[in-house]
Each structure stands twice: as C-alpha cells, then as structure tokens.
Image (spheres, helix red, strand yellow):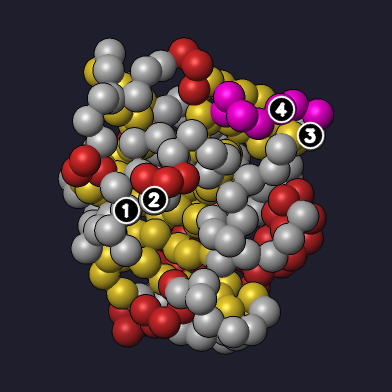
C-alpha cells in the first residue's frame, strides 16, 4: 500500500479497456447529450450520475439517488468501471466524458474550494484519445507537464492545473471525481510526480472553482 498524501500524478496498474473503441463510441453520441462547461472550457457528457439524470442536471451531486449509468452510456465503458475501477476505489461515483477540440485550452483551475486546500482531492482519469502530457501543473518554478501514460491515472485536483490539447486529434477523457476524493493509500500505483517536489503559486485568487 502506498500513502496518498504526497501524490500529484500516479499511474494505476489495472486492466485497461479498449480505448480506441471507447473513444469512437463517445464521439458518436448525439451532441444534445452533452453540455458546454464554461469553467473548464470543454464539452462534457454525463455517464454515471445520481439517479441516472442526464444533461447539466447530471453534474450535480446534491440530488437524491444512487449513482447509475445513463441510458446511453457505452457498454464497453460501464463494464470497465463496474468490474475494474469502482472496485479499485471502493465505491461508485460520478463519471463524465470530456471532449476537447485540437488547439483548445482548458481554463487553469483548482477542482476544490479554498477551505479544501491541502486536503485529499484525487481524481481518476483515463485518456481514451490524446495525450496525458497535455495536462500541466502551475508551480512557482513554472508550468510542469504531466508524464505520458497509456492507462488510467490519479491526479491531484487540489493543485492548480490546466490543459492545452496540442495534438491534431480531439482529446477524449473519462473523468471520475466527486463524491470520491481519494483513498488514504493505494495498491497497484506508481507515483510519477509528488506534491513535495513543487511549490504552489502564492496567489491562487483566479484559480478557484466557481461552480
């Protein structure tokens, strides 16, 4: 078991789904199933939500109900999460697909509130199409890109970060987050970047999550 409090970016040694097929099925979904997130500046498609709610409603974790797959969620994705990811984290949670066009930058942000700074704020991601190294951390020493990994990874959403899709392809990412915020320790991970190796900028005023 590896402790989690110093984790900034870690690869996860778990079976990986067929990413090419999963990306194809996400990109084939009708546009009316998605919504535009002005905060992160990317298209979002809810997949696992409370009560199976869809659209912008599906992003809210303040609704009643257990987490369920929406009716249009691709089977290749639901089976992977049900059989691999949810057992790994120990619970069900919200799952979104993020679709970012070539050349587009996500706004630099922190995925928590100011009172949650320096607490466990892990997110689980897998890039189905694109590169993980387009993600970067903002530090006092300058921007630091994440490493390139092929499989699922953990990232610290409580560290200010951004992403610019510098590839020629649409970037498709599966994102699992709240209400899961991380485990105290993990099996089967390799920590590739540590919080303790970097220094957070002094002024975080413009980075806080506004939604």
State the image quarter where residue 29 is shown: bottom left
Mark 2 lies on a secondary structure that is loop
Mark number, residue 3: 4
First of labels 2, 4 by sequence position = 4
Mark number, residue 209: 1
Mark number, residue 159: none
* Up/down of 107 relative to 195, above or below: below
First of labels 1, 3 by sequence position = 3
Q: Is residue 170 magenta?
A: no
What residue did someone put label 2 on? 113
Q: Are marks 1 and 3 in contact (CB under 8 Å)?
A: no
Q: Are marks 2 and 1 in contact (CB under 8 Å)?
A: yes
Q: CA distance from mark 2 to mark 4?
A: 23 Å
First of labels 2, 1 by sequence position = 2
Residue at 68% from the left image edge and 61% from the top image edge: 81
Residue at 48% from the left image edge and 34% from the top image edge: 118
Residue at 67% from the left image edge and 79% from the top image edge: 66
């Amino acid at each position: 078991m590896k402790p989690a409090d110093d984790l900034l970016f870690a690869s996860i040694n778990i079976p990986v789904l067929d990413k090419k097929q999963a990306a194809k099925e996400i990109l084939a979904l009708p546009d009316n199933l998605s919504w535009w997130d002005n905060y992160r500046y990317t298209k979002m498609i809810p997949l696992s939500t409370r009560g199976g709610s869809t659209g912008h409603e599906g992003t809210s974790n303040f609704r009643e109900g257990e987490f369920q797959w929406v009716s249009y969620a691709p089977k290749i994705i639901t089976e992977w999460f049900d059989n691999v990811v949810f057992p790994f984290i120990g619970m069900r949670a919200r799952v979104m697909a993020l679709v970012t066009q070539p050349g587009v930058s996500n706004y630099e942000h922190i995925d928590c509130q100011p009172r949650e700074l320096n607490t466990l704020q892990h997110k689980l991601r897998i890039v189905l199409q694109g590169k993980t190294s387009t993600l970067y951390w903002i530090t006092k020493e300058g921007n630091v890109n994440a490493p390139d990994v092929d499989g699922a990874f953990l990232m610290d959403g409580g560290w200010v970060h951004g992403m610019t899709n510098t590839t020629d392809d649409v970037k498709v990412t599966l994102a699992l987050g709240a209400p899961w915020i991380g485990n105290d320790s993990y099996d089967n991970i390799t920590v590739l970047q540590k919080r303790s190796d970097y220094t957070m900028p002094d002024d975080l005023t413009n980075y806080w999550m506004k939604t």
